[in-house]
Image (tube, rainbow, N blue to C red):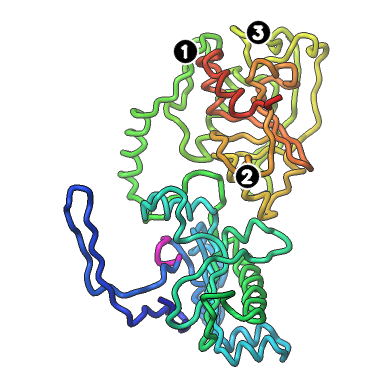
Amino acid sequence: MFKNFRIGHLEASNIKFDIYVTDKENNTTFLENQSARYKWPHDEISASRDLRKIRELQTDALKNGKDPSKIIEKFSNSNGVYEILSSVDLINILKTKDEYSDLVEKYNISSYGYFVYSTSVWDQINDSKAQLRKGYRVLKGGLQLSNNGMVQGDMITIPLTKSIGHQNQAHIVIHFEGADPDLGRKGFQPELRDLAERIAVIMVRRLTDRRSLLKNDSGAKPEIEKQKAIHEWVRDQEKHEEEFPLVLKNKNFFLPTKKISIQSVPVSEQDVIVLFNQLIAGGVIRGIRLLATSQTAQYDGIFRFISEEPLENIIFNKDSNPLGIEEEQCTKVYLGPPQILEYKFSLDGLIHEFESEIKDEKDINLAIFWDMGSEYKRNYNIISLIDLENVHQRHHHGITHIIKSNTSRFYAICLKELIDFLNDIDGCQSFQQSQYGIDI
């Protein structure tokens, strides 16, 4: 399956195969004379950029007296970046003439590295595009060792010492010539595995240096196919509005129309921002004052927690003010200090940025997102403030959850669960308690 890499090209194997599949109804489909070829991520994911070509284009621009930064603009908002390094490249990168560079030369080692903007892209390729059985992964982050003619082995975790979330976003393949792994025992020789891991770490660093070319990971489901035409996008939004209307039935908000202006369930981070601002303007959320929003700073915005007269407007009442705080805590007005706000479509997107050290969870005071996702289950505990048993822990009007790790704690507003709560307060209690409750 593996052939050695040529710069700018990844060869298919000379091996050919036929495959026949018979389904439960005894219908047979087949493919014949197919080439055995590794599933390179850049072939499966659209808008994947070859860093070598980008550097060449920038060099040509400089030679011709043009602005090389225009190349970056052209390739920005990509799904992934990749790079292929020959043995000569690797020796030059390793710099010192030592046992590692000797091994690179002896086994004519070459490497391929791909870095995707979000690990959810791997999920979409495997689950949606390839439609593999649940949990099965053909493409994912990790290190793959290869040798001419060998079968594909297990992925190895890339041994990063910082930004460890990148090990799940990076797909590295190291190729040897004539290494002759003992596949029946421990595989490649220890010194070759050590060298491969060292190269993998170097490649991840080189790829992440160009992270500015990639999309921002908002946690929304990625679109890895080619972008649709504008009229198709408009048509899809009309269909989405029809199939997934956003309805707030609680009679106490958005007077006199009692309707939210945004008419369909959010599908992007921008939709989340619009909906959140409408909830503040409509008096659904009364404990937050926005100061600024930024598209260029590291974080999305600045806000204050507030409590202002008349205090009766922020006191909890299950029927008329279910997002309020208990009367015993509502004793005085206050204007809190400026704090950091983050918007995401899903909390998963923010957690990915924490793991990649793009953002520091200790800096975040409030996160606004549509969907809770699932990544929090690994390292975070959640206190649901729309579980009526926990209302006493809500200190600011409108907050739905508190998110805690061993080292941090921040407030959150999960808009999907907020809407569900306001539409059916009693009906959502069992979900909140089973999802976030603590068994005693």
Considering depth in this image, is 204 or 427 the residue closer to the camera? 427
- Measure the alpha-carbon separation of dots 1 and 2: 34 Å
Considering depth in this image, is 369 or 151 the residue closer to the camera? 151
Does 256 lie within the magenta span? no
Which quadrant does the N terminus fall into?
bottom left
For badge 3, the amino acid type reads Asn
Q: Which mark is residue 317?
A: 3
Q: Which residue corresponds to mark 1?
A: 257
Does the rendering let one see residue 71?
A: no
In terms of image quadrants, where is residue 421? top right
- Measure the alpha-carbon separation of dots 3 and 2: 32 Å
Q: Which residue corresponds to mark 2?
A: 350
Q: Position of residue 433 (x, y in %)?
A: 61, 23
Considering depth in this image, is 392 or 282 the residue closer to the camera? 392
Helix, strand or loop: magenta stretch:
helix
| Disc number lying in front (1 or 3) | 3
